[in-house]
Amino acid sequence: MALKSQSLTLTTIFLFSFHNFYVLAQTCPYPISFSGEDCGNTVVTAPGCKTTVSVRLTNVPANQQNIVQIRSLPTGATLSYHVSSPADLNRLASSNLGAFSVDVMAIFEWVPDLSNAGRTYSTALYIPDRNCASNCNFELSVQKCRYCLQNRDSLDTLAALFGRHWTQIWSSNLDMLSPDNITSAPAEGPMAGAIALGNTYRSRLGDTWRSLSVRFGIPVALLQRLNPDLTRDDGPSSAGGFVDGADLFAATQAKASLICIMPETCPMYRPPVPGISW
């Protein structure tokens, strides 16, 4: 009887120890927390706009900021880490680090270009350990028909980028009272400095790139340049090619996307089309 009782006791101790080991193994080894106003939200931006997302990381093990990684980093985007507390900086500079933790700012920076227009990118800061659930997810929505003004930009220089006349861009920005004073763009936020490049059009059944080109007096190549999201496979236009025919209408419906156009406002500049006179 005593032998049986001893066996049960050893079994209980073993199971208890195994349970504790299992629970310990399932615990995240890095008690890092993420916070930021953009976590869980969509950041709206546009081609040419400098886009910054700041995330505060607390309880980061000293000199181990790189534990936190980023998922699905868009092409051209960067992620940097900054320790802002003077006390933490002094401790990091010392030779005796010990086991202390620091607060770190993770700074995501990106300037999308025209090839990103109309696309949404899902990304996240996370700890690459399956037992760590803390993270910061956010989306980047790059608007169509918008462009952030660069230093020394004017309507003339901007129109030249697209082979258009400056009056076409001016007519798309009703708040821009004077073409010599292009200050109607937002002054703050991710869309700071963004103005309208043209107008958006809701596709109809039967639309093709050529029919839209004829209707609005805009070359097919420019139409497709302004609408890089309307490809066959959600990849770059060089990979799957642009949708066309009935697929153009279906693609805009499936992606809830409008078509960006820069209509030719001067008939004399419209490209010649056989059988059609302006």
Image (cartoon, rainbow, N blue to C red):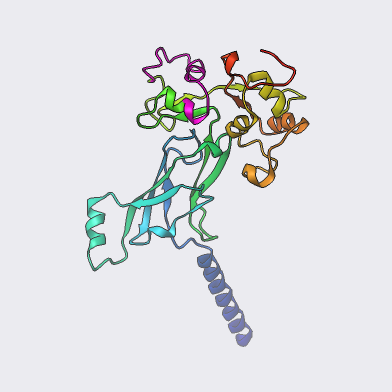
- Residue 173 position within the rendered picture, expressed as x and y whole percent measured from the top left: 48, 17
- Residue 109 position within the rendered picture, expressed as x and y whole percent measured from the top left: 42, 44
Which segment is the magenta one?
Answer: 159-182
Q: In this view, does 213 lie to the left or right of 195?
A: right
| Observer able to see residue 238 | yes
Question: Which residue is depicted at the point 55% across and 35% down?
Answer: 117
Looking at the picture, tell me which residue is in the foreground, 256 or 150. Answer: 150
User: Is residue 181 located in the magenta-colored stretch of the structure?
Assistant: yes
Q: Where is 77 relative to 101, above or below?
A: above
- Residue 39 position within the rendered picture, expressed as x and y whole percent measured from the top left: 47, 41
Question: Magenta region's main secondary structure?
Answer: loop
Question: Which residue is depicted at the point 60% across and 14% down?
Answer: 267
- Residue 2 position within the rendered picture, expressed as x and y whole percent measured from the top left: 60, 86
| Observer able to see residue 203 | no
User: Is residue 204 located in the magenta-colored stretch of the structure?
Assistant: no
How many labels sit on residues? Answer: 0
Q: In which quarter of the image is the C terminus?
A: top right
Q: Quadrant of the N terminus?
A: bottom right
Question: Which residue is depicted at the point 36% across and 18% down?
Answer: 181
Looking at the picture, tell me which residue is in the foreground, 110 or 264. Answer: 264
